[in-house]
Image (spheres, grey):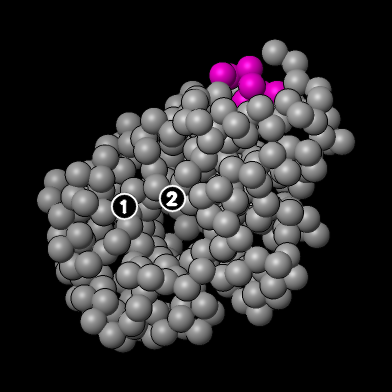
Amino acid sequence: MTITAKTDWFKLAHKALDGERLHLAEALAVLEADNDEVLPILQAAYQVRKHFYGRKVKLNMIMNAKSGLCPEDCGYCSQSAVSSASVSKYSLLDKETLLAGAREAMNRKAGTYCIVASGRGPTEKELEQVALAVKEIRETMPLKICACLGILKDGQAEKLAAAGVHRYNHNLNTSRANFPSITSTHTYDDRVETVEKAKRSGMSPCSGVIIGMGETHEEIADMAFALRELDADSIPVNFLNAIPGTPLENAGRTPAMKALKVLALFRFVCPSKEIRVAGGREVNLRSLQPLALYAANSLFVGDYLTTEGQKADADHRMIEDLGFEIEMCAL
């Protein structure tokens, strides 16, 4: 299928709004479109975004609650066992530090506070530490809590849900076909099963991708379709920030125009979901960051796990300049 006319992108928007799944050829047409078509594509994607989210932008803030010390070999990660990157290494932060992070999330106007820990998965002691902090945050602050603690064992998702965790994040990261070239210490199915455990526990499932790890256009489309099938409520779309000392340190940045096409594709494929422009947006989208919000309706505010992000007040101004509005948390 070849799509060349501006109005054809609106056909994809109408198809998304009608709940119809795009064909692979249609998904590839978005990714392979000439750069002259990016604005028409974004205009069509915005019709879908506006239908479900209006002009609201959701803000999320990450707390790197446990850094380094990870036995996994994920090639993109500066905290992995195969990374020689210079990063802080510390065990799980205490409750008071996690509470202070929640207060900072509110200062940054974030509606969701994301507690992220490196490692294959949480120990029972770590799970209890997180649960105690979450309970106190829920009692004292109007924040939604997302936990990202790795692969969950049986029963752990239920404990997090009982503590008041709203959302659990575990990214697919890449396509099933590309996964073995990125990680060998766990499988794609391990990640899918953790997301399914989160869903069964009653927590909202969050799962996303990292673009720029050698995947093909077909594999990017596969990622979007997989997340549609997984029915992830929140989809962070990261763009690789290649960190020196990681196996992917020499990977080039994703061109900004391609990044915009990817975000539009995810909006067409997963129309009603929270699409978050996530890690690497500053170094990949650069001056085109504002355009991302015509497809995405969410972003991380502040720093990431081991890399710096744009200042919170700059994000607030960017949203204001677009004529958009920060969506405050409504529990």
Residue at left 66%, top 79%?
313
Residue highlighted by disc 2: 234
Question: Mark 2 or mark 1: which comes first in sequence?
Answer: 1
Residue 92 in picture, x, y percent from top left: 32, 71
User: Please, what is the three-letter code of the amino acid marked with disc 1?
Assistant: Ser
| Between 166 and 83, the one nearer to me in the picture | 166
Q: Report, in whole angstroms, how far the alpha carbon at label 2 lies from the one at label 1.
A: 8 Å
Q: Secondary structure at mark 1?
A: strand
Q: Quadrant of residue 135?
A: bottom left
Quadrant (top left/top right/bottom left/bottom right) for the N terminus: top right
Q: Residue at x 32, y 57 (%)?
A: 167
Q: Amino acid at mark 2?
A: Ser
Judge left or right: residue 197 versus residue 155: right
Q: Does the magenta segment cover residue 280?
A: no
Residue 191 sits in which quadrant? top left
Give coordinates of residue 254: x percent, y percent: 72, 43
Question: Relative to 327, does residue 7 appear above or below in the rendering?
Answer: above
Image disc number at residue 204 = 1
**Measuring 56% from the left and 19% from the top, which residue is drawn there?**
23
Q: Position of residue 263 (x, y in %)?
A: 63, 43
Query: Few, some or many C-alpha atoms within 10 Å of disc 1 (few <14, some 14-19, many ≥20)?
Result: many
- Image position, residue 102 (x, y; %): 39, 79
Q: Are marks 2 and 1 in contact (CB under 8 Å)?
A: yes
Q: Determine whether the residue tagged by mark 2 lies in a helix, strand or loop.
A: strand
Q: Magenta span covers which residues? A: 23-29
Quarter of the image where the C terminus is located:
bottom left
Q: Nearer the viewer, residue 27 or 305?
A: 27
Q: Is residue 134 left or right of residue 281?
A: left
Badge 2, how many Cα within 10 Å: few under 14, some, many 20+?
many
